[in-house]
Image: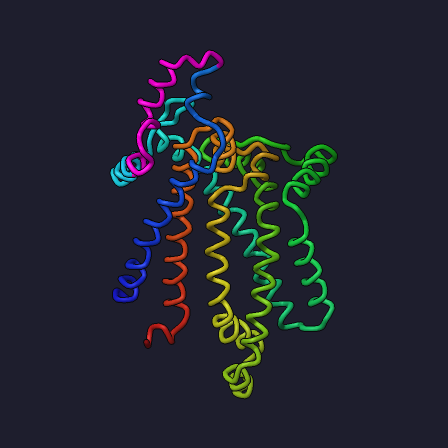
Amino acid sequence: MLAFLARRLAQVLPTLAVVSVIVFSLQLLLPGDPALVLAGEDRDPKVLAEIRERYGLDQPVHVQYARWVWGVLHGDLGESMRVGVPVGELVMSKLPVTLQLGSMAFVIACAIGIPAGVLSAVKKDSVWDYLANALSLWGLSTPNFWLGIMLILLVSVQLGWLPPSGYVSPFEDWRQSLATTIMPAFVLGNSIAAVLMRHTRAAMLQALNQDYVRTARAKGLTEAVVVNKHALRNALVPVVTLGALELGALFSGAVLTEQVFTIPGFGKLVVDAVFNRDYLVVQGVVLVTATAYVMLNLLADVAYFLINPRLRQE
């Protein structure tokens, strides 16, 4: 186990180094000059020079990158050019919101997608199979922003069951927090559930045709034991990878969904930072989410190791 983790960590560190270069290079692709935005309408040359000197914009790109990486290694993501608040504080203030929304969406997606995929595979070419595939096609084809708007019109405006937008922390009022996040979480989980269903179905169909499944049935085991203990456990191996990637996407922030429901998470923070040319905030958020992607893939590898006994034998 330790040797397995050591090999994976040896791959993670170079990956994070490459990610840092890509993240920093994003500022070169964004149009506009942040110094001009901060200077206002007058754009006095002295003010522009002071702004560029303060934030290091007058230095070569490689020097700016080296200073930024040095700060990141010491836990300093820089300071927001727009509001003058450390980027780390902004990230930490939005992180609980994104974690809550992403976790709820992932639970909803797994609760719908994996059972639907198993049922579709076990009941292949039946009404349940066709129904599950139709729901999967619906989830893949429906834009999140459109589904969000339709849910607001139906559930909030017409029925009045849930608030249409906003966010309340679960530490303030967990009932109101659940009420404000259940709709956006369902919108995010809807499309991911469709993807999980497709992959679970394909993996289950392949597992049900294996020799060990036929042997288990020949021993007289019940169908529930054959499906859940033998087929599903092996079919979950590729689904774990997909789940880790989708969870990383959720934690990176869903821009459109957060905009529709006015959720103050990572997505809204990035959108506001891009419009304000606040490059350090954009770099900080993207770096944090990219690191989360890499670490979630590492956790997926560990889950492989625990699920698949052949890896442990090797």
Observer-nearest of 34 and 11: 34
Q: Position of residue 56 (x, y in %)?
A: 31, 27
Q: How many numbered marks does the figure carry? A: 0
In the image, residue 243 sits, relative to residue 55, either above or below, namely below
User: In this image, 180 relative to 86: left or right?
Assistant: right
Kindly identify the residue that appears in the image at 47 percent across and 45 percent down.
Answer: 251
Q: Position of residue 268 (x, y in %)?
A: 52, 33
Kindly identify the residue that appears in the image at 30 percent across and 66 percent down.
Answer: 4
Kindly identify the residue that appears in the image at 49 percent across and 32 percent down.
Answer: 31
Which residue is the extreme one toward the bottom?
218
Q: Position of residue 180 (x, y in %)?
A: 57, 35
Q: Is residue 38 visible?
A: yes
**Which span of residues is magenta-colored?**
41-65
Q: Position of residue 82 (x, y in %)?
A: 42, 23
Q: Majority secondary structure of the magenta segment?
A: helix
Q: Is residue 173 visible?
A: no
In reply to whether residue 126 is colored magenta, the answer given is no
Observer-nearest of 254 and 50: 50
**Image quadrant of residue 133?**
bottom right
Q: Quadrant of the N terminus?
A: bottom left
**Image quadrant of residue 96?**
top left
User: In this image, 159 relative to 254: left or right?
Assistant: right
In reply to whether residue 58 is colored magenta, the answer given is yes
Q: Quadrant of the C terminus?
A: bottom left
Observer-nearest of 251 and 220: 251
Q: How is the image coloured?
A: rainbow
**Image quadrant of residue 165?**
top right
